[in-house]
Image (tube, helix red, strand yellow):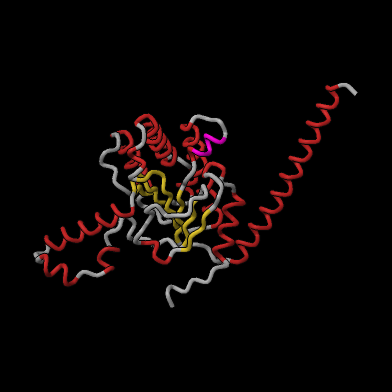
Amino acid sequence: MSAKPVQVAVRTLQTTRNAARGALLWGYEQRLTRAVKAHGKLPRHLGLILDGNRRFARAAGLQRELGHSFGAEKAHEVLQWCLELGIPAATIWVLSTDNTSREPHELAHILSLLEQEARKLATDPRIHANRVRVRAIGQHADFPPAVLVALRELEERTAHYDGMRLNIAVGYGGREEIVDAVKTHLERQAQAGLSLAEVAAGLSPEHISAHLYAADIPDPDFIIRTSGEIRLSGFMLWQSVYSEFYFCDVYWPGFRRVDFLRALRDFQGRDRRFGR
């Protein structure tokens, strides 16, 4: 037999195997979907640490900027999955305060993507059909003006919605959030005429909670981090005291719906005792 027919046969076999794997994965995903929906318990507030964009690009032999671009597209997919399941609130961590010290060209690309995605969300039919209220949380003062305008317009267009709550954490750090909350509390107490001693004597955890960036929604009850790293890296430090955590080995751009469903099924099997 000549080499060409052998090559054709091998390619045909590979195509058949790939199709079979795809069919099996699809069937498994459908079973997972039914099981998650049948159980009924879903997070009231889902936290997502989007990690692994650069490593995904490196592993695929791509420029690191493409890793961030693929990561942005994946965020749109995951938003759709949350909407389909009826998850009430989600916070996605896109850019940390530590990330802002990255090489200028990479940071400029990330911020350009942020502007682009904010403008895309502002006109996304899914956002308006599902009345999703979107808010950017973090420290943004040093962002380029065009990015700030895009984020502000997105928030303004969705400010009156009463559906799912979507927080985009950019320029975000958990320690910085707590410091900002303390500063706000102190400023307001000073405006009310209280002395520092009086403020210190009356200070309670509720005072800090009241001034966090997303104080009007429940604390995250489930946090997923991709890329295999097993740490929070400062994500919602104050709010995550009783959160359940799930660490997934896959890089963020490669995060599949089946990975998402597996995480939710794991959450549904946990017994949350809140210290009791």
Q: Quadrant of the C terminus?
A: bottom left
Q: Residue 249 or 81: which is nearer the viewer?
A: 249
Q: Residue at x 25, y 58 (%)?
A: 181
Q: Residue at x 25, y 55 (%)?
A: 179
Magenta stretch, overall SS: helix
Q: Residue 251 or 192: which is nearer the viewer?
A: 251
Residue 251 placed where, x, y %?
53, 44
Residue 195 vertical position relative to residue 255 in the rendered view, above or below: below
Residue 57 falls within the magenta-colored stretch: yes
Residue 186 falls within the magenta-colored stretch: no
Q: Residue 71 or 145: which is nearer the viewer?
A: 71
Residue 156 vertical position relative to residue 242 in the rendered view, above or below: above
Residue 16 placed where, x, y %?
79, 38
Residue 145 vertical position relative to residue 5 in the rendered view, above or below: below
Q: Residue at x 30, y 58 (%)?
A: 212
Residue 217 placed where, x, y %?
37, 61
Magenta residues, start to end:
55-59
Q: Quadrant of the N terminus?
A: top right
Residue 93 placed where, x, y %?
41, 48
**Horizontal arrangement in the rendering, residue 217 relative to residue 180 (left or right):** right
